[in-house]
Amino acid sequence: MLLRADCRNFARRMTTDGILKDRRAAYFTLGCKLNFAETSTIAQHLAAEGVRVARRGEKADVCIVNTCSVTEVADHKCRQAIHKLVRQHPGAFVVVTGCYAQLKSQEVAAIPGVSLVLGQQDKGKIVDIIKQHFDTSTDTPHSGLACSDVADASVFVPSCSCGSRTRYFLKVQDGCNYFCTYCTIPFARGRSRNGSIASLVEQARQAASGGGKEIVLTGVNIGDFGRTTGESFLDLLRALDAVEGIERYRISSIEPNLLTDDVLRFCAQSRAFMPHFHIPLQSGSDEVLRLMHRRYDTALFYNKVSRARELMPDCFIGVDVIVGTRGETSELFDQAEHFVDSLPISQLHVFSYSERPGTAALRIPHVVRPEEKHERSQRLLAISDRKLHAFYDRFVGTTRPVLLEHSRVAGLYNGFTDNYIKVEYAGQGQDNHLLPLKLIGWNADKKALIAE
């Protein structure tokens, strides 16, 4: 992961004792925005200690792999990434962390070349552990397993980082108490916990001082914010909205039962929170939601989406759906498909159910064949394409504010409107600046609107 120059200056560790000076590091991240934010923060902290990103063809001294375990495919990709980094950087100190490392620590530790498997509780100590390894004054380098029981995880490891583009990612919450039957997150990340509003506001101010214009709030179940500090998610939004210099906030994902009317009303009238929501549905069948142990039904979900659309008619609403879960018969999927099609939303993110060891879903009868999962995914993706194109079409001919960011094509900018329409712009502009642009029509591959 490459960091922009101004991101390197964002690290809170501003002093170095020289142990890691001129060392080189390679990073690999798989999974959610939260993982990418955490890896970026680790890279910033190492950069402040004198570590730079290994260039193409260079051998790294340190390799950090931040893993995901949401599906068996994710596990497989993590193993592939570890093997590749070990081959590319022989002799490097290889640290594997993240959800796969927590859930299957012994399996990861057995991979040749892995130096250290680091659990969630110790992720915040990674810089000190790496320094200890390279400290020539000690004869006991840190290696092996540091993977304590995630049930004991009580430490909130802060992260506010920017990627290679324009937006920062602010981690406000970690862990989850919901224990949905298909999900391993509570076992991989532990119980819900969060930073204080004061600490998060300070990180947002630092992002603004580093030139940040947009912040995405990340976490595992961010609507559950305040469980460990006695504060509320709404109070967090209010405090962040008052931070000068940040012109945009986006809420990465929020459970429908936690998307309160107060939160919706605040976002509708706030200074900087964008008309953009990502709300996990997971199934449009009440029976499947019951089997999943979700904390809402389709009626509540429909009311939340309708209320968001009522308060913010132009808002973008993305929705997560899982197909092929245990217990999802053809009749129940047909119900789910009909419900999803009825929703006034902008886009679907469709995932095929993957069985995870240790989850309660394995006790549910009726297993969906892989071919059926694929067919159901295609049906929902067709609905998503239709809804997304209809949403974009509504705004052709209108003018919206766009935050510009450089594309890989010379002379062309990419960007997003306030309501999350992807834009291509070939005019005069500057990276990380907001411009009011007129949306004039679709680009060649029908993936974005052209602006002028």
Image: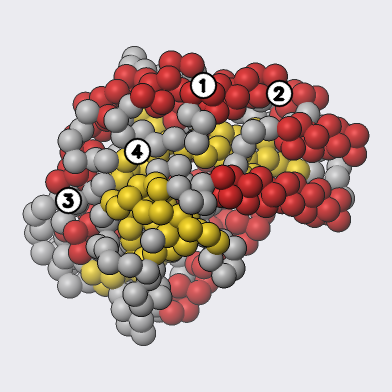
What secondary structure is found at the residue carrying circle 1? helix
- Residue beneath disc 1: 258
Q: Is residue 245 left or right of residue 270?
A: left
- Residue beneath disc 3: 210
Q: Residue at x 63, y 51 (%)?
A: 389
Name the image quarter holding residue 430.
Answer: bottom left
Q: Residues within 10 Å of mark 4 (few under 14, many from 20)?
A: many
- Residue beneath disc 4: 249
Q: What kind of residue is marked 2?
A: Thr
Residue 253, image x, y percentages = 50, 36
Q: Nearer the viewer, residue 415 or 372?
A: 415
Residue 247, image x, y percentages = 27, 41
Which mark is first along the chain, 2 or 4?
4
Which mark is first along the chain, 2 or 3?
3
Which residue of the protein is positioned furthest toward the bottom in this rendering?
Answer: 57
Q: Residue at x 17, y 72 (%)?
A: 22
